[in-house]
Amino acid sequence: MAESGVAGGPWSLTDHGKKAEMKLQANPYDLESWSVLIREAQTTAVIRARVLYERLVTQFPTSGRYWRLFIEQEMRNRNYEQVEKLFQRCLMTVLQIDLWKCYIAYVRETKAALPGFRAKMKQTYNFALEHTGIDFHSTSIWMDYIEFLKSEEYHGSYGENQKTLTIRKVYQQAITIPMMNIERLWRDYNTFEQSVNKVNAKKVIESVSRQYMNAKRSANECEGFTRGLIRGGTSVPLQGNLQETQQLQIWKRYIAWEKSNPTRTEDQVQLVKRVLYTYEQCLLCFGHCVDIWYEAALYLQRASEAGDVQHSERWSEEAAMLFDRATFGPHKNHLMLNFAHADYQEARLKFEKAEAIYTKLLDVKDIDPTLVYVQYMKFARRSGGIKAARNVFKKAREDSRSSHHVFVAAALMEYYISKEKAVAFKIFELGLKRFGDDPSYVLAYIDHLSHLNEDNNTRVLFEKVLSTMPPDKAGEIWEKFIEFEAGVGDLPSLLKVERRRAAALKGEENRSKDSVLLVDRYKYLGLMPCSEVELRMMGHPAAVKPSTA
């Protein structure tokens, strides 16, 4: 944890804590070392503990548990202004049920003496249920809210009727949501209706029993699909271990179940809300998992394409916001996700925003920008034409970090898009000056010429490259030269190239053997003129190595 201390020194005052900080310098996601420091923070002055907690929630911004520990320590010290600021920072992005319960408890504890306390509590419960009320573990919030409403005192029949209607409305909302212990909620609701009016109770209960049975069935299914799921885990970079793989599989199974519309709702808005909430829950634990971010954004994008105008616009904006959160957060330098974000903005005709994504990546000093330039050129061509793509290529070839791929991409774009054969040839030749000793670039150039039936130019290229390329790099080029002569040349030319290759590669016995040369003369694509055993016995480079098992 390079910044764990004040003014560059260690934060911890104990030897155990200092050792933990040393470990965090090497691995800032070491949860055991963080736990050591958290335990120390919980027993130290809040001003000093705040330094550690700030670093903790910066490192793990989606951890509801860590935010809650920070907030609870501030609450114990009655730093309510600080608590309010912390809730403002985390509540809307960390939809973790225990954190929201903490928020409700905070309002109940600190606002009880205010004149408008009950109205404030109603507002707080409604706010919490609006954002987390569909959570499988939200049962206690619903039940607490109902008990709060029951405790309210009214004078007169009108007030009592309004109270009954409000409680009934909340009950009937709750019993339609698949959640844990929904049976208890249903029993309480039955008792409530019986207490209101025994004569009408049966009729009222029967009117909502179908919705309840649907929610109960879905809740049972949900328990099955999420069995073994560890909720509220801390998001760390993927390790690829067994537990992580299993947890991801459960989350993906859970998400797929929600997408299948298990509640059989005809309300598309409600369905999208449930699916997106499940994605958000998964991202709290697996925020470093790129495909979850992409799939969530893609789901919203597709929902926006299928919905009505009002909701389509909202879901489209939510998809853009999701991409923003990913590419300005844990995946700010991830190429694939940034490219997908750029494509999304381009599809919305937000060309300036799309271009800003590419330029942002190019400003990162410690990445290979080659693929960024290639995709940037393609975008520029689509959005601004071939001249715009050429401007990007100009930047790419001036960037010393970029590799030969940008020359290949630019040349092929000129050939296939602008139909400028001569321009493509010039770009390949320009790249040859810089990457003439790179077999991959030379092979790409040769492949292009071979598709043009430019036999003479292809031979010139072979000769030019082989005259300067070091023998240890030229093996593939010689093989390609032989393949070329075998396909378009005469036998004397082929034999001449074979002899030259043998002489050039005399230090590489497996490549210069006469039998190896003969195999290369007659092979075609994956077809070989002799058996695998024979290839292995003669030491041909293409031979499959025998198993050592």
Image: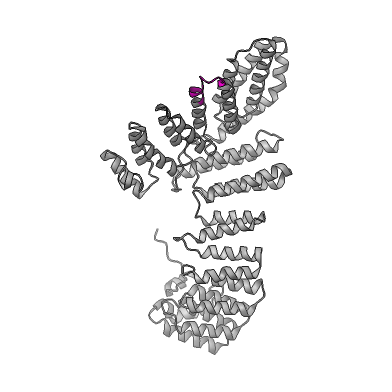
Look at the image and tell me whether residue 538 can be seen.
yes
Position of residue 81 measured from the top left corner of the image (x, y, whole percent): 46, 31
The one of 195 and 501 positioned closer to us in this rendering: 195
Q: In the picture, which quadrant includes the C terminus?
A: bottom left
Position of residue 295 measured from the top left corner of the image (x, y, whole percent): 59, 48
Look at the image and tell me whether residue 180 can be seen.
no
Q: How many marks?
A: 0
Position of residue 263 measured from the top left corner of the image (x, y, whole percent): 66, 33
Q: Residue at x 34, y 36 (%)?
A: 48
Q: Residue at x 61, y 68 (%)?
A: 389
* Drawn side of residue 539 relative to residue 127, left or right: left
* Drawn side of residue 492 relative to residue 43, left or right: right
Which stretch is magenta? 107-117
* Drawn side of residue 13 relative to residue 73, left or right: left
Q: Residue at x 71, y 15 (%)?
A: 202
Relative height, residue 527 to residue 294 (above, below)? below
Q: Residue at x 51, y 29 (%)?
A: 103
